[in-house]
Amino acid sequence: MYAIVEIAGRQYRVTENNHLVVNRLNAAEGSKVEFDKVLLIGGDKVKVGTPTVSGAKVTATVKEHGKGDKVLVFKKKRRKGYAVKNGFRHYLTVLKIESITA
């Protein structure tokens, strides 16, 4: 069984007992979070929501918070002596999908 879930404005395909990396959520490590914006539930029989499947939810556990890979931003204007190098790292949350209920 799998589901399409909207988490923090993005859509993810999730299955039970899998790990998922999403943008940082306001939840403590080890806590359980529930997502009720389930757009589709698949498996033997597919349920498509309009826009969401009523009564469906996905339960996950927050495993850890971390940062993604560094992304470098380099700006340059030729012949002007202008060059700026910046970088940033996204704040991420790792979730373990516990259950999908329809």
Image: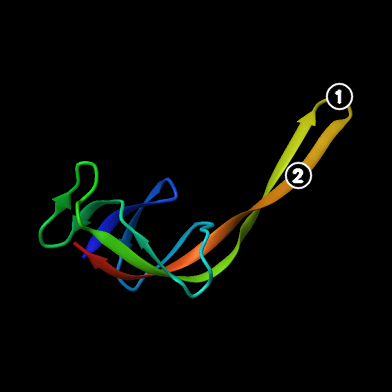
Q: CA distance from mark 1 to mark 2?
A: 20 Å
The structure residue drawn at horizontal position 32% and vertical position 54%, both measured from the top left corner, is 5
Above or below residue 43? Residue 98 is below
Q: Outermost residue, left direction?
A: 45
Q: Amino acid at mark 1?
A: Arg
- Please state the horizontal and vertical placement of residue 76, each as a whole percent of the image: 78, 32
- Please state the horizontal and vertical placement of residue 41, each as a whole percent of the image: 20, 56
The structure residue drawn at horizontal position 42% and vertical position 45%, both measured from the top left corner, is 9
- Residue in the foreground of this view, choosing between 4 and 28: 28
Which residue bears the numbered disc 2? 86
Above or below residue 39? Residue 65 is below
Q: Amino acid at mark 2?
A: Asn
Q: Could you tell me which quadrant the N terminus lies in?
A: bottom left
Which residue bears the numbered disc 1? 79
Q: Are marks 1 and 2 in contact (CB under 8 Å)?
A: no
Q: Quadrant of residue 100?
A: bottom left
Q: Quadrant of residue 86?
A: top right
Badge 2 element: strand
The structure residue drawn at horizontal position 32% and vertical position 61%, both measured from the top left corner, is 14
The structure residue drawn at horizontal position 10% and vertical position 58%, both measured from the top left corner, is 45
